[in-house]
Image: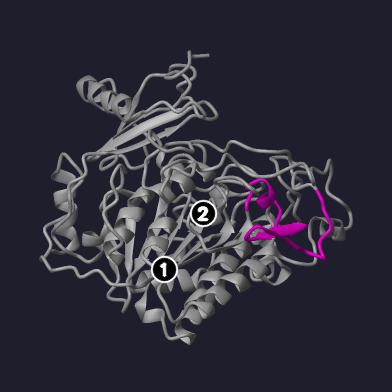
Amino acid sequence: MTLPKLLLLALMAPVMVAGQRAPAPHQPEQMNVVLIMADDLGYGELGCYGQTKIKTPHIDALAGEGVRFTQAYSPSPVCAPTRASLMTGKHQGHAAIRGNKEVGGWGLNEGEGNAPLPDSEKTMAEWFKQAGYATGAFGKWGLGGPGSEGHPLRQGFDSFFGYLCQRQAHNYYPTHLWNGNDVWIFTKNDYFRPHQRLDAAPTDPAAFEQYRGGQYAIDEIDEHALAFIESNKSKPFFMYVPSTIPHAALQVTQPWVDMYPVAWDPAPYLGQSGYLPVLRPRATYAGMISRLDHTVGQIVAKLKEEGVYEKTLIIFTSDNGATFNGGVDREFFASNGDLRGFKTQMWEGGIRVPLIVRRPQGGAARIETYPTALYDLLPTLNEACGLGNATGIDGASLWPIIEDRAETTPRPYLYWEYPEGVSWRGVRRGDFKAIQPNLKAGSPTELYNLRTDPRETKNIAAENEGLVRDLERIMQLEHRPNEEFPLPGVDTPRQ
């Protein structure tokens, strides 16, 4: 079916369905899988999604021979919950981790880690490991610190290199990372706090050099990821690359900053909105995203060098929309496209994310409008690789859509909740999206028609009271209380 017909069907349908495609038998195969997830990368920050200022040629090339989803969503508007849903296939009403709950302190030797993913959860990595795959993770974990049950080596990964703790990942020049259960020391980096502020701009630009070190963490993480490919090229492998880029603080090595015009930055960022000061904030942010694109390019080149590119499924996505702090200029880059909102919010700008899937052997570029969430990736990969049928999850396989086939199970709705901040929850059914944007205060439900109003500028709840009640019932149905992450205004009294 052509894209216009598919779009017409999607607009007419009361539920989320794929168009009628030519059926074809699917034979699972032991393909390799590389899953790359950016951190706080906005929907509009890639060239293939409309970005005009930031250079992302390698990611754009993947989209040029793959499927580019235009209505893909993160399970949560922040980091750790999205990672938990991605790994377990459960939406946030059922997930074990629903917020960025911290363990330990912020300073050096004060402990590190985040609320651990329980042993009882079966992760994506465990499915692959059970099927005989080599499994490795390289980047930011955020689902359990040293010695915890949530440690990646206890959640199905054979190897891990990177940040276990999200707070430690606020600095790209850390004193250490983790190589499995062992500390990896950066001998050229001295400790400094990743949240500082200057009262006034220094007269000497060299003053900003204090917020750098001698070893950039991403360089070392990339080396370990590439070595994993080389070591496992003769057997099927699953490689998860949860990059820290472009999450603040704004830090990247100078050549990436110099790719972009000095005129972009008439003034430095002094740390007034959190994280670290930086001399050229816009150029640094763009350089970070181009550095992420370089990671993708290195991985693709390594897969080709080792002769496994054409037997590898590559997925690229982000954990939530672009942020509101740390010196990030969303308006300058149109980071979330023309969508409303940003990280921590459930308007489209906070949860709509890029999703690119490049199958083995590639293929013609295709745009897919089917609404999906990242908790769909676990059942998708299980079907694609023949790992088994996961039960007790909320995700639905996208593999028939990716293969352009007919056998797609209709999805009645997508669900979100977020207990932190003012506390949010929401549901999308067909074209309609209902959100409760301040559960703590008991604010009324808002309703938007995403087909006619993708920017969510007109709340139509008052004209559609019956539909609002239906969607509120879905919210109640999909929420299962979690003692560690109670939902304010639902599990606890309003404030």
Count of residue discs? 2
Residue 188, percent from left and from top: 82, 66
Front-lying residue, 302 or 353: 302
The three-letter code of the residue at mark 1 reads Tyr
Residue 279, percent from left and from top: 76, 56
Q: Looking at the picture, does residue 452 appear above or below residue 307? A: above
The nearer-to-camera label among 2 and 1 is 1
Mark 2 vs mark 1, CA separation in Å: 29 Å
> Circle 2 sits in a helix, a strand or a loop, which is it?
loop
Task: Determine whether, in the image, residue 313 is placed left or right of residue 282.
Answer: left
Task: Determine whether, in the image, residue 213 is placed left or right of residue 291.
Answer: right
> Circle 1 sits in a helix, a strand or a loop, which is it?
loop
Q: Looking at the picture, does residue 263 appear above or below residue 102? A: below
The residue indicated by pointer 2 is 41
Question: Which region is colored magenta?
Answer: 164-192
Q: Residue, x 45% and y 22% (percent of image)?
A: 439
Residue 338 shows up from this direction = no
- Specify how the rendered protein is coloured: one colour
Q: Residue, x 31% and y 79% (percent of image)?
A: 361
Magenta-drawn stretch, dominant element (helix, strand or loop): loop
Structural crowding at the residue carrying mark 1, measured as other residues with C-alpha within 10 Å and reported as few (<14), some (14–19) or many (≥20): many
The three-letter code of the residue at mark 2 reads Leu
Q: If you read the primary sequence from the N terminus, does the residue marked by circle 2 or circle 1 appear first?
A: 2
The residue indicated by pointer 1 is 133
Q: Residue, x 28% and y 76% (percent of image)?
A: 363
Structural crowding at the residue carrying mark 2, measured as other residues with C-alpha within 10 Å and reported as few (<14), some (14–19) or many (≥20): many
Front-lying residue, 457 or 196: 196
Task: Determine whether, in the image, residue 164 is placed left or right of residue 73.
Answer: right
Q: Looking at the picture, does residue 225 appear above or below residue 461? A: below
